[in-house]
Amino acid sequence: MTWSRLGQLPGAVRRHSEAVLQAILAGTLMRQGWTVDYAPGRLRLHRRDSAIDPREVITRMRKRELTHHTWREMLVKFQVDPETRLGTGM
């Protein structure tokens, strides 16, 4: 499914789809040593001095603010192997 098709889904289906993508991203990062910092209404993953909010990442992807190039830059910045496949090892 493409981001443009995801945006055409009914609201509840789109929100559920985005929640699944957030969970996949979080699970992938956890397998690479990131830890969960959760408080009501907030979820972040931390490793060393870095933090990632999976909801923010997926929202930026949906809004097309996170291009392929900026995605790879983010991965390098957070020391995540750019070749990592989301959801592998589940």
Image (spheres, helix red, strand yellow):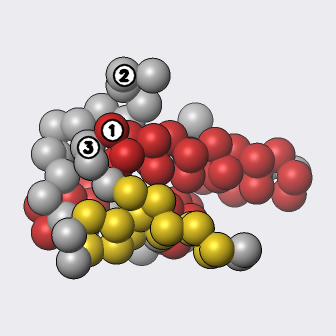
User: In this rendering, is residue 85 above or below 70?
Assistant: above
- Circle 1 SS class: helix
At x 63%, y 43%, the residue is 20
- Residue placed under numbered mark 3 in the picture: 32
Residue 58, image x, y percentages: 52, 60
User: In this rendering, is residue 33 above or below 64?
Assistant: above
Type of amino acid under label 3: Gln
Type of amino acid under label 2: Gly
- Residue placed under numbered mark 2 in the picture: 89
Marking on residue 7: none
- Circle 2 SS class: loop
At x 47%, y 59%, the residue is 36
Q: CA distance from mark 2 to mark 1?
A: 8 Å
Q: Label 3 near label 2: C-beta < 8 Å?
A: no
Residue 87, image x, y percentages: 42, 31
Neighbourhood count class around disc 2 (C-alpha, 10 Å): few under 14, some 14–19, many 20 upward? few
User: Which of these two is toward me, 22 or 7?
Assistant: 22
Neighbourhood count class around disc 1 (C-alpha, 10 Å): few under 14, some 14–19, many 20 upward? few
User: Which of these two is toward me, 45 or 85?
Assistant: 45
Q: CA distance from mark 3 to mark 1?
A: 4 Å
Q: Please indicate, yes or no, whether residue 61 appears anywhere in the rendered image.
A: no
- Residue placed under numbered mark 1 in the picture: 31
Q: Quadrant of residue 52?
A: bottom left
Q: Earlier in the sequence, mark 2 or mark 3?
A: 3
Neighbourhood count class around disc 3 (C-alpha, 10 Å): few under 14, some 14–19, many 20 upward? some
Type of amino acid under label 1: Arg
Residue 16, image x, y percentages: 76, 47
Q: Quadrant of residue 1?
A: top right
